[in-house]
Amino acid sequence: MNMPEQEKRFSKQLLGKTVVSKSGKRFGEVGDIVFETHSGELIHLVLSNPTSYTEKMELEKDKDGRILIPFSAVIAVGDFMVVSEEDIV
């Protein structure tokens, strides 16, 4: 699958981006990215500095207790990483 050049991004461009919902609720920042090593498929965003709003949601966590956001919930990447809240819960 060939992606247009503007769709290619380096992980360092994503790390530290603020994660928000479509409605503008702040979730935290991208602390890390989990991917499948064989296929390269992106699986999760690992949140750093989660907000109190995010802490109240019962989201999946890794073994270290860090909140995971399914990468499939990401709908836009620009100044912010926009996620679809419906696809997270």
Image: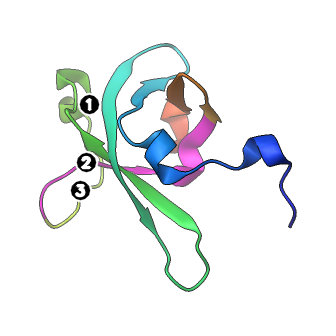
Element under disc 1:
helix
Amino acid type assigned to the residue bearing label 1 in the image: Thr
Q: Which residue is mark 2?
A: 67
Q: Which residue lies at the image location 26% right of the left edge and 35% below the top edge?
A: 57
Which residue does the image show at 53% across and 33% down from the upper left?
83
Which comes sooner in the sequence, label 3 or label 2? 3
* Residue type highlighted by circle 2: Ile
Distance from disc 1 to disc 2, alpha carbons, whole Å, reads: 8 Å
Q: Would residue 69 be counted in the magenta stretch?
A: yes
Give, as a single range, the part of the protein colored magenta: 64-75
Residue picked out by circle 1: 54
In three-dimensional space, the C-alpha distance between marks 3 and 2, rounded to whole angstroms, equals 4 Å
Where residue 16 sits: x, y (%)?
35, 35
CA–CA distance in space, label 1 to label 3 = 12 Å
Q: Which residue is tagged 3? A: 61
Give the camera-side residue of 9 and 35: 9
The residue most toward the bottom is 38
User: Quick one: label 1 or label 3, which is nearer the N terminus?
Assistant: 1
